[in-house]
Amino acid sequence: YIFIILNFLQLEFLTPLEEEILMKGIDSISWDQSQSGRRKQNYGPKCNFKKKRLAPGDFKGFPEFSKFVQDKFKNVDILENYETIEQCSLEYDPSRGASIDPHIDDCWVWGERIVTVNLLEDSVLTMTRFSGELTRYNLLDVSTYSPVLDEKGHLIERPLSLDAYEITCSKTTAATHQHCLAPYSNFSPNINRDSVDIFDDCSDSDKADIVVRIPMPKRSLLVLYGQARYSWEHSVFREDIPSRRVCLAYREFTPPFLKGGRCADKGLEILKRSKEFWGHEPIINTQ
């Protein structure tokens, strides 16, 4: 297990046989074209991040062949109480110049833990400091809900009422996670202001030039959280795709969409559907 800038990497999360079973199932389902040369298979609700609209759409759960992956999450401490509400298969093929540009996953609806299971080929996730406006990626929303993990990756016990976080959390917790209580004008996307930043001694201009390279070996599990989730953009370069690579990306809800949150009514049906797993008829190649 490896922790660096608040991410978690577990090597050989899957066995070679599990990887083979998973890929057989994935390739038995048709792919949709995505951006930057990627192809995808997406299972999750319909989201409009700009207008902040969420609907179940045609989401009916996840393919049965992939259920064992989510079952294995239950044995990973950092994924305690993780409820998958989106699963996306992403294919990177060098013949199409596949890559993904620097970005931060949306912070209005997608929760703190960004999970990736890597298949077929080793690759690298490139992390660069985010220095843009906090209106991007709905980063301002991070100040409106409580963190899920502390800086050591341990689950923080949620208050009974998520909307009453300022009232119900302990003074110690409130001091440690000031971003939950701070007004927007003082908000920093760092998940923990009291946590140690190994780049604190660098000037702002030097920080802008810092690049962190995180290995993503095949069959590994990667979890981004905390500063790695909110203060750094992540990307995958074309040159880091030597041959076909597939990954499974998983998302959870932010606290407002969970039980007790102010948007819990919007999340309830999606959470219900996320517990379903369905079979499918494999694609028959007649050529």
Image (cartoon, rainbow, N blue to C red):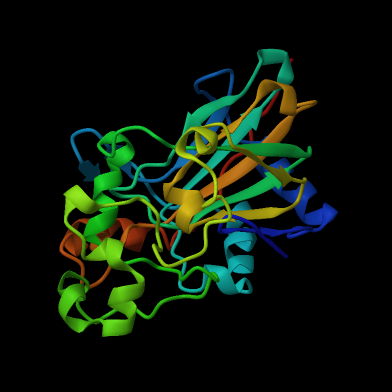
Residue 70 falls in image quadrant:
bottom right
Residue at the location (25% across, 56% down)?
143
Residue drawn at point x = 54 percent, y = 50 percent: 201
Tell me which residue sits at (17%, 62%) in the image: 265
Q: Position of residue 282 (x, y in %)?
A: 63, 37
Report which quarter residue 48 is drawn in.
top left
Q: What is the quadrant of the C terminus in the image?
A: top right
Give the camera-side residue of 129 and 215. Answer: 129
Q: Position of residue 92 (x, y in %)?
A: 66, 27
- x and y percent of residue 218 in the render? 77, 45
The residue at the far right in this view is: 16
In the displayed structure, does residue 111 sit left or right of residue 144? Answer: right
Which residue appears at 35% of the width and 32% of the height? 132
* Res 31 visible: no
Compared with residue 19, is residue 101 higher up or lower down, i.e. above or below?
A: above
Q: Which part of the image, by quadrant, shows the N terminus?
A: bottom right
